[in-house]
Image (cartoon, rainbow, N blue to C red):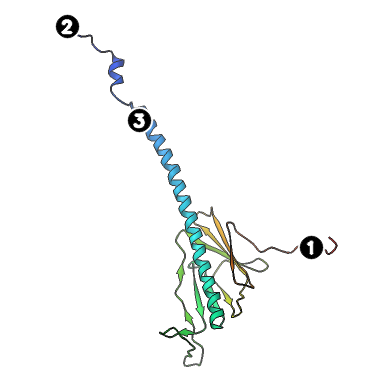
Amino acid sequence: MAIGKPRSRRARHAQAGFTLVELAIAVLIIGIGMTYVFMGVETFSATSELKATARGLASTIDFCRNEAISVGETIYLEYDFQNQRYRAIFPFVYDSDGTKQEIRDEDDQEVTEIFGWTNLPARIRLQRILLPGNEAIENDRARVQFTPIGSTTAHIISLVNQRETMRYSIEVNPLTGLVEFYEYEKEFDTAEESDFDIEG
């Protein structure tokens, strides 16, 4: 009976699988890859949430403008910075059948219909509202109006994500009440002396 040669250490080691160092390197590579994937997903999610919030606010702006034209009344949109929310305010109430009815209280004051607040998502913040001349409102509450002829208070709403790495602006045209979106913090264009130079 032939006795085989004892296997060398190197041969036994090759069949033993990964070493601890090799496993650590593999785990490190997987960890780095997962970090990049997570960061990409989180950035995409935050961007989508910021844009969706801006679109939702723009829809409310359009609603207020269209209703003001439709019913021939001035309608207000109120922004609440302290609680990060907004709502529409009508100078009348609707009956259960949807018809407009002006109701007065015991002091003969008009009763307004105040729509429920729309809260901003936890990761999105209403940063400021700019009025013409770049006058910024950043605290308390701000109220803008939409008139029956379709005009509104000119303003720019700035939204920002929680980490303040992404900003989004909504500019409301004062004559038409229509909105434009910007993927940065927009300000009103200011006139310069050269703008009034007739010869130039």
Residue 36 occupies quadrant: top left
Q: In this image, 152 relative to 81: left or right?
A: right
Q: Give the number of marks.
A: 3
Rendered position, 123 above or below 71: above
Spatial CA span between label 1 and label 3: 68 Å
Q: Residue 82: image x %, image y %? A: 50, 68
**Of the pair 168 and 176, the residue shown nearer to us:** 176
What amino acid is at disc 2?
Ala
Q: Mark 1 or 2 closer to N-term?
A: 2
Residue type of the residue flagged with mark 1: Glu
> Under tag 1, what secondary structure?
helix
The answer to whether residue 8 of the structure is visible from this angle is yes
Q: Identify residue for label 2.
A: 2
For the N terminus, the quadrant is top left
Query: Please, which residue is most extreme toward the right here?
Result: 199
Q: Specify few, some or many for label 1: CA neighbours under 10 Å numbering under 14, 14-19, or 20 or more.
A: few
In the current view of this chain or complex, which residue is farthest to the top? 2
Ranked by sequence position, the earlier of labels 3 and 2 is: 2
Asked if the residue at tag 2 contacts the one at tag 3, i.e. Cβ–Cβ closer than 8 Å, the answer is no
Q: Name the residue under label 1.
A: 193
**To which residue does mark 3 refer?**
23
Of the pair 135 and 111, the residue shown nearer to us = 111
Does 94 sit left or right of 191 as displayed? left
Instruction: Between label 1 and label 2, give the one nearer the viewer.
Output: 2
Are there few (<14), some (14-19), or many (20+) residues within 10 Å of tag 3? few
Residue under the point 71% across and 63% down: 190
Real-space Cα distance between discs 1 and 2?
105 Å
Residue 42 pos. (x, y %): 45, 50
Q: In this view, does 36 lie above or below 149?
A: above
Quadrant for the C terminus in the image? bottom right
